[in-house]
């Protein structure tokens, strides 16, 4: 059995499984309980007969940071966390969606739901040193993006150094989606008022047979709202 350092919460349906496990990947500076468990995803999926896996990404929640935090390295760690399966469905949000893009290369992914995904590398312009300086008691960075990240990595319960390392790894492999790189059935979901996923419609032509649904809410509101969960469940339960 392959070992993984990630903290993974596992939920089983009451009866026989009605489909493959569903892997839920949370966003940056969050964790599995905040994005998924508190919003009712495992209970909805297990009620539909699906086993559920909810990891904390490296450097987030109860998972330690990795030495290598590039997307490909994290994808390999997630594959180890899932273990040996014949199929798995994946729902990712924001950073989780970015990482989910890499998973079909290392896991037998059957279907993907990618919510709140930026079509560009969101961390490319972040001044990591300035964000860490704020975490150490310095001034809030003047750059609005870096200031937002600085506030995120210093929120209660967060590990600023581990999250900064995550950003640095993502910057080493910036998101540059290409046509044909993703071939599994995919549903994109974006909040109607979400600036992070602005331009997500440009990803649909890159993935054969994919679609895009718009749901109410901004970046956080779309994640917490029932329409996103409904859209994902409908897609994952399609024969």
Image (cartoon, rainbow, N blue to C red):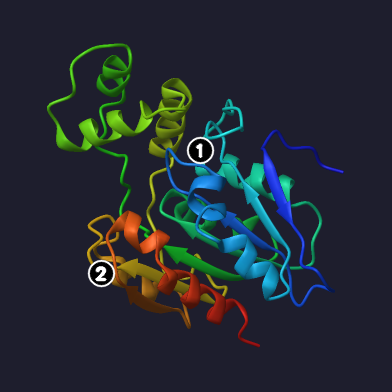
Q: Residue furthest bottom?
A: 239
Residue 125 x %, y %: 24, 37
Tell me where residue 179 appears, x and y as whole percent: 42, 69
Q: Is residue 119 visible?
A: no
Locate residue 141, reporting x and y percent. Answer: 17, 24
Residue at mark 2:
192
Q: Quadrant of residue 43?
A: bottom right
Left or right: 160, with 34 as reference point: left
Please give the name of the residue rendered at 73% of the width and 74% of the height, measured from the top-left corner. Answer: 49
Observer-nearest of 210 and 18 = 18
At horizontal 67% and vertical 37% (from top left) the residue drawn is: 6
Q: Secondary structure at mark 1?
A: loop
Q: Which residue is mark 1?
A: 70
Residue toward you, 57 or 102? 57
- Residue drawn at 40 percent across, 60 percent down: 223
Residue 23 in view, yes or no? yes
Q: CA distance from mark 1 to mark 2?
A: 30 Å
Vertical arrangement, residue 10 with respect to residue 67, above or below: below
Nearest to the observer: residue 224 or residue 161 = 224
Instruction: Please state which of the two labelled residues, at mark 1 or mark 2, is closer to the viewer.
Output: 2
Q: Is residue 179 left or right of residue 149?
A: right
How crowded pointer 1 is (Cα within 10 Å; few <14, some 14-19, many 20+) is rated as: many
Q: Residue furthest left?
A: 142
What residue is drawn where x is 77% and y is 61%? 12
| Image quarter (top left, top right, bottom left or bottom right) of the C terminus | bottom right
Q: Residue 218, position in %: x, y? A: 27, 60
Q: Secondary structure at mark 2?
A: loop
Q: Is residue 120 left or right of residue 142?
A: right
The quadrant of the rendering that contains the N terminus is: top right
């Amino acid at each position: 059995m392959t070992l993984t350092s990630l903290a993974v919460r596992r939920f089983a349906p009451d009866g026989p499984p009605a489909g493959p496990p569903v892997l839920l990947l949370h966003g940056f500076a969050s964790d599995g309980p905040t994005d998924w468990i508190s919003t009712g995803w495992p209970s909805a999926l297990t009620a539909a007969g699906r086993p559920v896996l909810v990891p904390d990404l490296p450097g987030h929640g109860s998972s330690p940071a990795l030495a290598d935090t590039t997307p490909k390295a994290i994808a390999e760690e997630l594959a180890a966390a899932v273990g040996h399966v014949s199929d798995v469905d994946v729902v990712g949000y924001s950073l989780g969606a970015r990482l989910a893009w890499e998973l079909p290369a290392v896991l037998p992914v059957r279907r993907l739901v990618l919510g709140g995904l930026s079509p560009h590398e969101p961390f490319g312009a972040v001044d990591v040193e300035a964000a860490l300086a704020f975490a150490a008691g310095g001034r809030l960075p003047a750059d609005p993006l870096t200031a937002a990240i600085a506030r995120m990595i210093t929120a209660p319960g967060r590990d600023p150094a581990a999250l900064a390392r995550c950003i640095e790894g993502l910057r080493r492999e910036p998101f540059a989606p290409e046509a044909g790189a993703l071939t599994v059935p995919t549903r994109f979901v974006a909040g109607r008022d979400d600036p992070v996923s602005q331009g997500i419609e440009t990803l649909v032509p890159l993935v054969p047979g994919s679609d895009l649904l718009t749901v109410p809410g901004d970046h956080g509101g779309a994640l917490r709202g029932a329409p996103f969960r409904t859209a994902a469940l409908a897609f994952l339960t399609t024969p």
